[in-house]
Each structure stands twice: as structure tokens, then as C-alpha cells.
Amino acid sequence: MTVATVPASTRAGRLAPPGGQQTGGRRTAEVQLLVIAKQPIPGRVKTRLCPPATPRQAAAIAAAALADTLAAASAARAAHRTVVVDGVIAAPAGWAAVLQRTGTLSDRLTAAFADTACDGVTSLLIGMDTPQITSTDLDTITAMLADETDLDAVLGPAADGGWWCLALRTARLADVLRSIPTSRPDTAVRTLAALRAVGGRVALGDTLRDVDTASDAWAVAAMCDPTSHFARAVRDHLPHGGEA
């Protein structure tokens, strides 16, 4: 994964480190993976796939995206893994589950970091809209915070202007998310600016396409292993024929 670091001239002062050990100038820390997810109920998930999909087909595609996301996260290096869920989802073996709080998505993202915070543990949060991710993608993001002692966060932008992942050394940085509107073409830009404004030093991961519309789903399915849950669900449940 290619990484572009925010130029030093644009950074504010260094945040105090949240802990961790120093080994030859390299700070090591445990990592926890957080997947924020919604129970795939027809009519409540992936509604922008309809049409051409029906609500039941869209829910099947959402369930497949979640399955592949959890599989990738299960294979990534992490000391702890937690599903932060709206509704009811069976967490994989070895995973914890935490209910999302109420409020806007910005509120729920902030709370997801706060409710799972552990001293000295880096948190990497992803959603269920990028089923093409691999364990290597996730390991690359977390390795950046382990390897770069001057970084506080890694942000993975999405092609539509949002973001697909956010890794934070300390959960208190997530407080900035509360004031940032989501689902906008400038969400990632605003997130980056807000992190810098409170003294965070941030690196950027690769930009990935997330799944909102039918055209997104077809494009992302083409990036996936054809035997993956998501690729098969798109073949089975998302008819070609354009979007409304």
C-alpha cells in the first residue's frame, strides 16, 4: 500500500504519546481491529442499490460484504477484534461485540473508539463497505503506526470523498469526528484537517472504492476473488441493467 505523509509544514505540534514501549527508537503497541457494522435487514442496508436490486437482494449483498470484511480482519495481525454493531450480528470466534450508541454516524464513530479504548492500544476502525480489503491491507495500515514514531493516525480515503479506515494511537483523537458530517465529498478532507488541528500527525493510506451504488458494487466485485462472498452475491443478486 502506497502511503503519502502529510507534509511537516502543515502539521501542528506533536501530541504526547499514549504509551507503549520503545525498542531501538521504534515504539511498539498492541493493535485492536474494530468493524462498525449494521445488521443486514432488508430495507435498512444498502438502500442505494435499489433499484436495480430489491431490498432483500441488497441485504444479501450487505451480508456478503460483512462476511468478507470479517474474514480479512480475522486474518490480520491484532491482539483484539471487536464488532461494533447496530442490531444483532453473530461475532466470529475470538471476537467481542459492542452495541453502537445512538445518534448520528459521526456520534457513533466517535463512541466506537471511546467504548473500546484501551491504554497503549492502537485502534483501527473499518466499515463493511470495502469487501475487497485483505489482511495485508490492514496490516500495512497498523504497521505504519508501529514503524513511524512521529505518527498519531492513519486515514484511508474513499474514492467518493469519505474514508474507509481510520487508525488512531489514542482514542481521544476520535473526539474530532463528532463535528464532521459524513457521506459528503469532503468528509475525508475535513477529517484530516480536524486531526491536524488538534495536533495530530497523520499519514494517508491508499484510496479505495467503497460500495454505495450498483456501479460501485459491480466495480468492487471485479476486484475481489471471484469465489468471495461478495463477488458471488453480486453475481447472484445484482442484475445488470443500469441504475435509477
Image (spheres, helix red, strand yellow):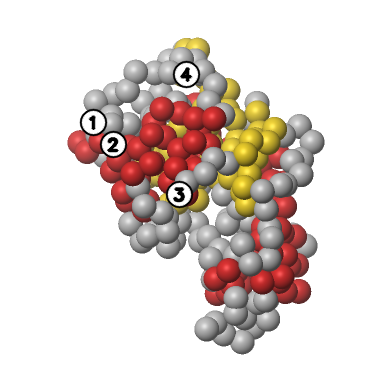
Asked whether the viewer can see residue 174, the reply is: yes
CA–CA distance in space, label 2 to label 3? 23 Å
Nearest to viewer (mark 4 / mark 1): 1
CA–CA distance in space, label 4 to label 3? 35 Å
CA–CA distance in space, label 4 to label 1? 21 Å
Residue 142 locus on image (x, y percent):
53, 34
Residue 214 vertical placement versus 105 (above, below): below
Find disc 4 in the rendering and name its residue: 27
Residue 41 locus on image (x, y percent):
69, 60
Binning the other alpha carbons within 10 Å of mark 3 as few (below 14), some (14 to 19) or many (20 upward) gives few
Find disc 2 in the rendering and name its residue: 196
* Image marks 2 and 3: residues in contact by CB distance under 8 Å: no
Give the amino acid type for the residue marked by disc 1 in the picture.
Answer: Ala
Circle on res. 104? 3
Nearest to viewer (mark 4 / mark 2): 2
Asked whether the viewer can see residue 8, the reply is: no
